[in-house]
Image (cartoon, coloured by chain):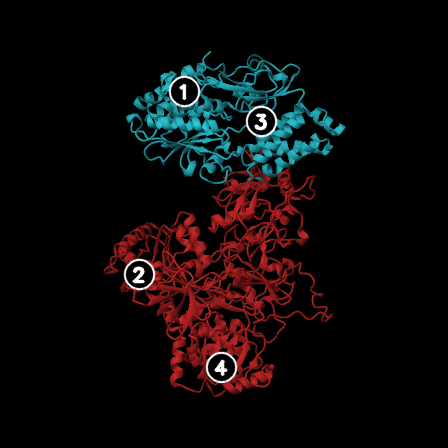
Amino acid sequence: MPTIHIDKIPYAVKAGRNLLEACLGLGFDLPYFCWHPALGSVGACRQCAVKVFKDGQDTRGKLVMSCMEIVKEGMLVSIADEEAAAFRSQIIEWLMTNHPHDCPVCDEGGNCHLQDMTVMTGHNYRRFQYKKRTFLNQYLGPLIHHEMNRCIQCYRCVRFYRDYAGGNDLNVFSAHDHVYFGREKEGVLQSPFSGNLAEICPTGVFTDKTLKEHYTRKWDLTTAPSVCQHCSLGCNTTAGERYGTIRNITNRFNGEVNGYFLCDRGRYGYAFVNSVNRVVQPLLRHRAVESVDDVTLMEALTMRMAHQKLIGIGSPRASVESNFALMQLVGKENFYQGVTEELAYLEKRIVDVLGSGALHCSSLGEIAGSDAVLVVGEDVWNTAPVMALAIRQAVMKKGFLANTTVAPSPLDEISACTLHAAPDDIARLGFAIAHLLDPSVPPVPTASEEIQRTATSIAEALRTARRPVIISGASCYNEALIRAAYAIATALDPTERKVGIAYVLPECNSMGLAMMRAPSIDAAIERTAFEHDLTVLVLENDLYRILPAKKADDFFRRFKNIIVLDSLNNLTTEKATVLLPAATFADGDGTLVNNEGRAQRFYQVFIPANQHIKESWWWLWKLHTALTAASNGHECHPDEVLARLETALPQFAGISRAAPPPDFRIHGEMIPREPHRYSGRTAMLANLSVSEPKPRQDSDSPMTFTMEGYQRIPPSPLIPFFWAPGWNSVQSVNKYQQEPGGALKGGDPGIRLFEQKAGADRVLFTDPPDAFAVRDQKWMLLPQHHVFGSEELSGTAGAIGELTPAPVVALSPRDARQLGVVEGTIIRLRMDQEEVSLPVKIQEGLCNGVALAPAGWPGMAASNWGTWVNISA
Amino acid sequence: MERPLTEYIQPGRPPLDLKGYEMTGGYAAVRKVLRGMSPAEVQQQVRDSNLKGRGGAGFNTGMKWSFVPMGRDAPGPKYLIANADEMEPGTFKDRLLMEGNPHQLIEGMILSAYAIQASVSYIFLRWAYRQAAQLLRKSMEEAYAAGYLGRNILGSGYNLDMHLHTGVGRYMCGEETALLNALEGKRATPRAKPPFPQVSGLFGKPTIVNNVETLCCIPHIVNKGAAWFKGLSYSEDSGGTKIYGASGKVKRPGAWELPMGVTLRQLLEEHAGGMKDGFTLKGVLPGGASTDFLTIDHLDVKMDYTSVAAAGSRLGTGTMVVMDDATCPVGFVHNLQHFFAQESCGWCTPCREGLPWVEKILLSIERGEGREEDMQLLHMHTRLLGPGNTFCALAPGAMEPLQSALKYFGEDFQRHIKNKKCPY
């Protein structure tokens, strides 16, 4: 470790870092704009100037840009040097010559890096006497608001949007002091990562447009550490609330998971929390007055459930706590996963191979740092966007990428090797690669020359890689893909390299649910065929998204009592005889297990005014105690549920360590959800009552709903907001990290439930599927996922709804010709039990014999995926 | 007095075609080199000749070439680029060379490319030089047809392709790394150095960017030797001749090839014919708009790199802009700053925001709206837009005429402010 001297004091710093990173890492407040840990140094803004001296005799020194200098042993540096400080202050004055100084009406105000840096340099009087240059702003779609006059030209936006995220419709135009950042023409930003512009922009040029609709300053938000609910990756988020509604979602840094960035589904998917479609009241249906109070409700429930055989349908989008509470209530043998048989089977395979411990399960951070990535069939761009972003970073660092998918993907652009084929054929390619890497895997019979050639080049790249990652997933509903990915990963000799595997799953807690190893919904349906007088509890699950409507109707018809817990009204809640309002991630606590097997806690952001809204696990526990008459007035906490879970299902061992227990204190203090500058606390509800209510207590976590409590950096799972003295904006995350861009202090949050075990047996998959055979007049129906609209909760409202593409059925050009249809022709899909009519989209590059229909679209039940359907024009 | 570069340039007549050029000894150097000289020998000869870059920086050309990785394992393809984006205000020497004798440039490029074993070469030409573009294109066609360009040149096994690229008229493209970005189809913003273009230049490959005049010297060095070339100069500082120029209110504005190191007085009085009647000399920008003023006190300064530097300016392109006593220095400098502010690429803060501010201050002083504080602001900018504080040399160059104007003509500025109007 080299030693550098900053203002005459020696410090040991990490070799290879630049001087700015070293200074920030040591806790110095050195201002900067264009540098960003994820984007690196470019030396454009000249804000981070410091003095460097040649030797002890050199008294004049030289101004250098600290971001452009690599630390050297014995370096003599001065931050405090007058000339350096004056230069930094002058940089701000220059940047301010054209800045509109409109902080009071700017959404960035109070959360603005430019404000922070201005104060940090001490600049306070602008001597520029002339007219400022002004720009026209652009309409950039429903997610991002554009206000170009505020721009300080740090080039971060285009460096993120284009270089980091691969977008091409945002650019820098013109020159000199007219440099303009925007689109060539007004229009919706095309990248699904565009929302990050709001955080990467150090001032208010790009701001969150949805926040604008219910604007709240950062200091007025009550925030809590949360976990994204909209795909299986478990990106860490911060959710902000005021007056009982969620106002925004921002990124919460986790070096192992999402790093600095979220996808737009994750950032803007929160509208459902505030939706008018929320279930707000417990209902007992078929009564004169359906909405009931607690006492009537519990009486009715215990009466209906006592001496009844209960079955429970779990949910991949409900927390581990809620699913397990349901399992406890109904009994292990009566608990069913709320997913189709096909999906349950795939997920069981994934849990089996990951649980065997033969392979290392890669985090997103590891994927971004890998030197070879092979995607086996999964449409990562749409099913796990932030994973696609991680893959892109691997490629940008000269890593190899082979992307094999059913349909063309934006990742193809950076892929060295691309294949578009039916899932079975992709799996065959996978087995062919595995055979080339390890001859003990049998060869794929009758593999085409193209497959052989592709396999050879991919195998070659994997063989030379030191940190390869194989990625697959469940979205093709093809079990052979899961096996093929595993076969390749195990065929790579682990003594020479660190091999990783990653599977993408459909929902935020698909992994947690699958790990409970319960039978599928189909098993439940079968059971009801011969067993009557059952009462069903459906946990946060719209069965109409899984089953054809007729099948779901038949299923519900077999029960007299249907108890449904959910947060939004849907077709399943319509069927409920008893409906219980469930909390969302914003008004409840819970734990999710992401695709990597990482258990992560999300915390309740606020206590809703509507006191009927409770976490599902709370309701289920209450029912459990009521039925067993064991309550003793004891309130249940998530940690108790998890402790029981660890005992009942040992595969979850360690999950209770995902977050500090509710009685965790630092110097006797709890962690406040409200920042020290929270305003209006006593005035907020004064129109209703002038007496200040007692602060709401949170017995489920070591966090409070007030401003009072521990004011410094909390343990990483409990960080409600990033804020440090002098650093009001999100850039303050530097202060929470062990080093700039590194892990959070105390380690990144989350507990990994799958660990590689030395000497674990590898399962040998040796059975490649037969080649995909196109059928006459039949098409294999596969889901086309989309960042926007495919996921249930995010897809229902607001900006996401606006961006959801119109539903179409994609066919290959040859198949379209054969059917005699053209782009836009309405065709009829005849599935097992239902029919839908949709317009055709002719997709170049799609293989023949396959039809892609919109995933998550109402009317397209998940049970249809992977089945053969008829199509007529 | 020998004038190797301009010997066959006849004002008013079309330039030599291939045949004519060959009859004057053209392409003999290419034959000589391809038949019997190794790249290292060419590099050494150019190094020995003490040829210094004529674009303004004055770096030893042979030395610059020596940083290019050579040999079998060197990354390729390597590139040679002629920087013909002549946009320095007051400068028109490269134009003379390209319009007057385009084959000389092409030959110089072939030799230079051979010396670094480049296989692709570009001429990055200022868009406004339409005639030069036409002539270069025609000459390149002739050279291709005659086998001086293309595959297996003169049976030597050496291959070189040449392309003409016309820019869109950005001063920034004269900066070699910005030129590379522009040539790659990117914005013309400069790149951070290191890596230097010699190692990682165009498309990340080893690249040499040389000025047109520099390249035109090469055939003559190869033909007549390093010692001869050195002997052309009056000065120890650099070998060869230099194309000097003068514009402004002199009797005979123009450009002349003269031994390196003639004095400013010789240039002004003998070649430019002295000032026009009724005008006296007030100041000279000796090497284009981005050099410091010299005054009548500097008339005996030798016009070579070290002597001009010792006098407090830079030789730059060697083409001087003469300012007379009837021209307002404030207006003069404002005009220059308007140019520099407009040509800033917008990459780094001090240049992007500082230059327009300076321009606005100067305009307000010129209009009689200046304030005493403005002088402080101007001084501050000349100090803070110095080398190292900005990303590239554009803003420091822009500050050179301003800082020297403040030094030599400070009274003029004060009169503007005091009298609230331009006294000229």
Q: Amino acid at mark 3?
A: Ala
Real-space Cα separation, disc 4 to disc 3, in angstroms? 86 Å
Mark toward the viewer: 4 or 3: 3
Residue where numbered disc 2 is placed: A425
Residue at the limit of the structure toward the front, as seen here: A820
- For residue A677, above or below residue B385: below
Label 3 lies in what chain?
B
Residue where numbered disc 3 is placed: B289
Q: Amino acid at mark 4?
A: Ile
The answer to whether residue A721 shows anywhere in this view is: no
Residue positioned 50% across, 41% down in the render: A71
Q: Are marks 2 and 3 on the same chain?
A: no
First in sequence: mark 4 vs mark 2:
2
Residue positioned 59% across, 57% down in the render: A209
Tell me whether the residue at label 4 lies in contact with that at label 2, contact meaning CB atoms closer than 8 angstroms.
Answer: no
The answer to whether residue A411 shows anywhere in this view is: yes
Q: Amino acid at mark 2?
A: Asp
Q: Which chain is cyan?
A: B
First in sequence: mark 1 vs mark 3:
1
Mark toward the viewer: 1 or 4: 1
Label annotation for residue B16: 1
Of the chain colours in the picture, the one used for chain A is: red
Estimate the x, y position of residue A137 in percent, counting from the top left.
Answer: 60, 50
Mark toward the viewer: 1 or 3: 1
Tell me whether the residue at label 1 lies in contact with that at label 3, contact meaning CB atoms closer than 8 angstroms.
Answer: no
Is residue A685 or residue A225 the one in the foreground? A685
